[in-house]
Amino acid sequence: MTEPAGYLLAFDVGTRMHGVAIGHPLTGTARALTTIPVNPGKFDWRMIDALVKEWQPQAFVIGLPLALDGSEQAMTRHARTFGEQLRQRYNRIVHESDERFTSKEAGRRFAEQRAQGKAKRKHGADIDALAAQIILESWFADPIHRPSSS
């Protein structure tokens, strides 16, 4: 199935915060956008609606939190539930991307930004958006997951 080449909105799904990033498959680049607080068991659809309206993404990418051995866990089901709700609410394709090592990489990049004076400790919540950026970058980097042009 082909899909239009447009923006993709990516989510690092968490229990307290969702990180959000935007990117485009033609450039293969992504950037952190924002974080969305999560109330227990509830997604903030008002904020997500605003992002979808602003960016008009053609599809979504959600980070799939797997155990280190690749097996599923409770958070995997939580992320898939969120992905299914995105698909139903916006009628767009939802891709999944293995996010096992994104939090570690996001922490490394954030520490690097702090060392360079580009971020402060108070920006720590932004690490979730940075994780979403890394999820999308790794999804773009894998040719299997890139939108088909045929």
Image (spheres, rainbow, N blue to C red):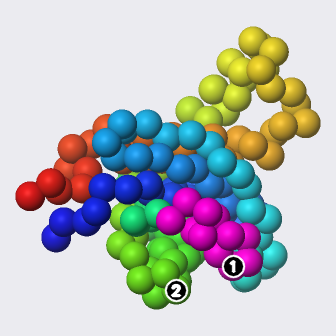
Amino acid residing under circle 1: Trp
Per the model, the C-alpha gap separating discs 1 and 2 is 9 Å
Q: Is residue 90 above or below residue 69?
A: below
Residue 84 visible in the current orientation: no
Q: Is residue 12 above or below residue 31?
A: below
Q: Classify 10 as above or below 135.
A: below
Start-end of magenta stretch: 45-56
Q: State whether residue 10 appears in this view.
A: yes
Q: Is residue 46 magenta?
A: yes
Residue 112 percent coordinates (x, y): 68, 18
Question: In what quadrant of the picture does the C terminus appear?
Answer: bottom left
Rendering coords of residue 13 (x, y %): 60, 62
Asked whether, in this view, residue 76 is left or right of residue 149, the answer is right
Residue 89 left/right relative to 38: left
Crowdedness of circle 1 by 10 Å Cα count: few (<14), some, many (20+)?
few
| Snapshot quadrant of residue 78 | bottom right
Which residue corresponds to the image point at 75% horizontal and 12% vertical from the top-left? 116
Per the image, label 2 sits on a secondary structure element best described as: helix
Of the residues shown, which amino acid type is indicated by label 2? Arg
The circle on residue 104 is none
Q: Residue at x 58, y 68 (%)?
A: 52
Q: Nearer the viewer, residue 60 or 110?
A: 60
Residue 94 position within the rendered picture, expressed as x and y whole percent measured from the top left: 39, 70
Q: Which residue is mark 2?
A: 89
Q: How many marks?
A: 2
Sort mark 2 into few (<14), some (14-19) or many (20+) by Cα contacts within 10 Å.
few
Residue farthest along the top direction in this orientation? 116
The numbered mark at residue 45 is 1
Is the C-beta separation of discs 1 and 2 under 8 Å?
yes
Q: Quadrant of residue 7?
A: bottom left
- Give the mark nearer the N terminus: 1 vs 2: 1
